[in-house]
Amino acid sequence: MIIFNDTVIVDEAVHAKWLNWVKEVHIPAVMATGYFQSYKILNVIDSPNEGITYCVQYYADDIENFNHFYNKHFHQLQAIHNQQFENQFVIFNTLMKTVD
């Protein structure tokens, strides 16, 4: 299993609005691509950063599904995210593989 993790540090002033948008708009758009089978939203409890830190994890069956998502959809979805919350968040991505 491949896990694509978005760690997002959101300004406290907009974090409720951001979380609602992610749940109602962004995640449904990512899932509609068909390349992920499930997702989780996590809140980082002990983050040393200013703002509120979330991790959104998307689960794909294999690296090919992730690569198709990345090549066909990632940049457009990222641009929409940036447009919606410009200068109000910092994001970094991590790609992981489960170990049997």
Image (cartoon, rainbow, N blue to C red):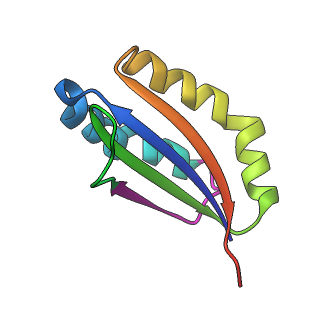
Please give the range of residues in magenta.
33-42
Q: Residue drawn 49% across and 23% down?
A: 80
Residue placed furthest toward the bottom: 100
Give the left or right position of residue 77, taking residue 53 as reference: right
| For residue 42, above or below residue 19 | below
Residue placed furthest toward the right: 64
Give the left or right position of residue 22, taking residue 7 as reference: left
- The front one of 21 and 52 is 52
Residue placed furthest toward the front: 48
Quarter-of-image position of residue 85: top left
Task: Give the quadrant of the C terminus.
Answer: bottom right
Residue 3 % position (x, y): 62, 61
Task: Give the quadrant of the N terminus.
Answer: bottom right
- Residue 41 lies in the magenta-colored region: yes
Give the left or right position of residue 65, taking residue 41 as reference: right
| For residue 60, above or below residue 32 | below
Residue 18 % position (x, y): 29, 33
Residue 45 % position (x, y): 27, 55
